[in-house]
Image (cartoon, rainbow, N blue to C red):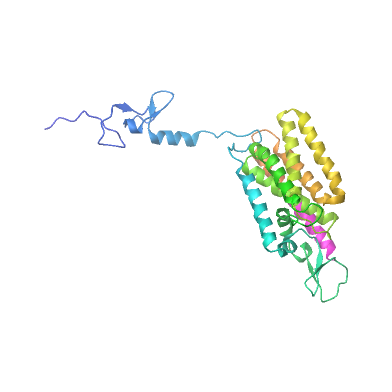
Amino acid sequence: MEPESTVTTCYRHPAVESHVRCTRCDRYICPNCMREASVGHQCVECVRQGARSVRQARTAFGGRITTAPVVTYVLIGLNVLAYLGELVRPSVVDRFEMLGRGLVGPDGGHYVWVAGYPSAYHPEGVVDGEWYRLLTGAFLHLPPTGGTFGILHIVMNMVSLWNIGRVVEFQLGRIRYVTLYLLSALGGSVLVLLLAPDSPTLGASGAIFGLGAAYYVMARRLGADMAQVNRFMAGLLLWLLISASLTSWQGHLGGLLAGTVVTVAYAPRGQRRTLVQAGACVALLALLVILAMAKVAELTV
């Protein structure tokens, strides 16, 4: 009878002799399988399992810490792609801009809504079931020679989105940031529907005003130096007043209010923070939907 071998081998590489045990599972491991630990060495599987059990770091608002503003890149990309689509096919603007109600004539032209319109005309806008306009309008901008600003419309909005969006995204995390952006855009469109349903509007300004509100609320929550933040908000509110005569102030104000509500809901601490945040966002969404549906019902009577 041959004596039993006393040579120990790596559990992952049986052909390799090993004399070191994993401090976690006590199995023999070779140099290729060793990973330094606070005490001794661990095997690859134990290190992987330990990494899964480690709680990930979170921002002050509960979001996952990110190293790159990926969502901001994507949002800018979507706005630019939509703008290129407008340049190739200008009819995209009439089809997807925010419009509460309007009329399309027999010549294909777009006209202001009038009660008791002729049978040759047919309605368009949210009153005609085009609910997507509440969001798609936030990704469109004035053509190069259109309106007061022309191409500066998208340039100014994208510069603002880049400057503010990165800060907000890093603090909120990607999911909360996307939610804030979309609810702010929706809030702007709903206020346009409520107060100026006959006015076609477009632009990311409502969503950006929501990000501006978030920037202010977060700064107060984090105890930042408010001097610079207050100057920023003063400029934002000044532009809100100026925009009353140049652009859709309703969209700006709606985005500002929605962004404030969302970010205030993001601020609470505690174990139920995520539940409170999600509940507040769902409640705001429900309110905006109810307001929009009630207004459409009123307009179609």
- Left or right position of 49 against 82: left
Locate residue 226: give its quadrant: top right
Please indicate whether residue 179 sits to the left or right of residue 213 in the image. left
Percent coordinates x, y for residue 259 in the rendering: 75, 43
Residue 262 position within the rendered picture, expressed as x and y whole percent measured from the top left: 73, 42
- Front in this rendered view, residue 1 or 246: 246
Tell me residue 255's x, y (percent). Answer: 77, 47
Image vertical order of residue 144 relative to residue 1, above or below: below
How many marks are shown on the rendered structure?
0
The answer to which of 216 and 232 lies nearer the viewer is 232
- Corner quadrant of residue 89: bottom right
What residue span does the magenta drawing correspond to?
Answer: 285-301
- The answer to whether residue 166 is visible is yes
* Secondary structure, magenta segment, majority class: helix
Placement of 16 over or under 157, stated as above or below: above
Residue lying furthest front: 145
Taking the magenta stretch, the answer to whether it contains residue 287 is: yes
Q: Could you say which is closer to the camera, residue 91 or residue 251?
A: 91
Q: Is residue 1 above or below residue 112?
A: above
Give percent across and percent down for residue 41.
Answer: 38, 27
Q: Residue at x 77, y 63 (%)?
A: 125
Please give the name of the residue rendered at 36% of the width and 29% of the height, measured from the top-left corner.
Answer: 22
- The image shows residue 158, relative to residue 293, as above or below, that is above
